[in-house]
Image (cartoon, helix red, strand yellow):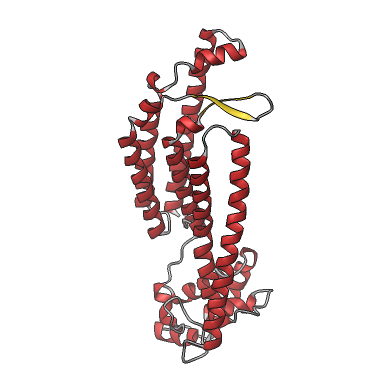
Amino acid sequence: MNLIDAYVYEVTRRLPKKSRDDIAMELRFSIEDMLPESYTEKEVKEALAKMDDPAVLAASYRDKPMYLIGPKVYDAYIETLKLIFPWVILICVILNIVASIGMFNGEESILTVIINTITDTIVNVIYAASQVFIWTTIVFVIVERVGLSKNDLPLTKRGTPWSPDDLKDVQIIPAKKIISTGEIIFSIFWITVWAIIYWNADHLLGIYSSSDGNGLQLVMPIFEQNVLLSYWPIVVTFIVLEVGLVLYKWVVGQWTKKVALVNGIIHILSTFAFLIISRNANLYNEAALPYIEKTIIINNVVLSNAMDVLWIIIAASIVISLIIEIVESYKKAKI
């Protein structure tokens, strides 16, 4: 591990992208200027010890000063908010979706339900986020004012003052290689949404019609719920695999060949299972096609052919998206 590179990385990762390269060059020059031509690791540590904590130095480069939260705890404060906020938002969204689906009885129009769900979700997210922000800020203000450390040096994530030895634990990860928290949360969100839709397909997926000015109403489901639920062991297996994959990505934190391989295998298997299940003719409501024929006045043969073409288009789109995802993941792993 090059300690100079690690120190520069620890400073610049806290800065806006547009200024990182210039500041990195300036920092590297300043550090190397403090060292002899042939320097040892001990001399590098001594030079870095004379520099500020990376968090404090990064704060000095920021255009906006820090007022309420001082440099001693500012970095830990921001890291805490970044860690908590996405999960708070995810939990609020999932709880509101589950509550809306649980209370949906088909009497209200689907548009009304969607609008109410979105409105309630936004209100709850704002309320929860504001509470998290307020109480987290209060805690860190108290920590800084009361002082939980015997010195005034900024604290690291371990709660101890920074030293050059901390750089040995730093992993310099290229930006494109990082698996972000946002990506993790987005994955969990979609797994949850699709799981909810699967077990409530007869209430959500179907033919909707508007009559008497009451908005869109569910006329009939497009799936035979009993047949759909007969695949629950397969569905649950892939839900568990997907959740395990997401947690694995979260722990590793970056794209590696192993992560890309596991990701590719699980997604290939789940796509294959989806395509096989979707070809089961008994899966679809027999009354759906006659209703569509009657509604839009179309020949049965033409409609059947159109549905086959639609399935091919959807299947092809899914396979192409899968190939692109696998290729991109391996590209990131090779960086």
Q: Which residue is drawn at 38% across and 42% down?
A: 264
Instruction: Relative to 196, say whether 53 is above or below.
Output: below
**Which of the 4 image quadrants contains residue 157?**
bottom left
**Does 12 appear above or below 31?**
above
The one nearer the camera, 116 or 134, is 116
Left or right: 16 as drawn, with respect to 83 = right
Q: From the viewer's perspective, is 325 left or right of 265? A: right
Residue 266, given in percent of the width and then of the height, sits at: 35, 42
Q: Is residue 244 left or right of residue 223?
A: left
Question: In the rendered view, would you say 215 is above or below 43?
Answer: above
Q: Nearer the viewer, residue 163 or 28?
A: 163
From the top left corner, tell me how far across and down residue 22 is, in percent: 63, 70
Q: Residue at (38%, 59%) from the top-left corner?
A: 251
Q: Looking at the picture, how far across and down is residue 271, in whole percent? A: 40, 34
Residue 123 visible somewhere in the drawing: yes
Counting labels gives 0
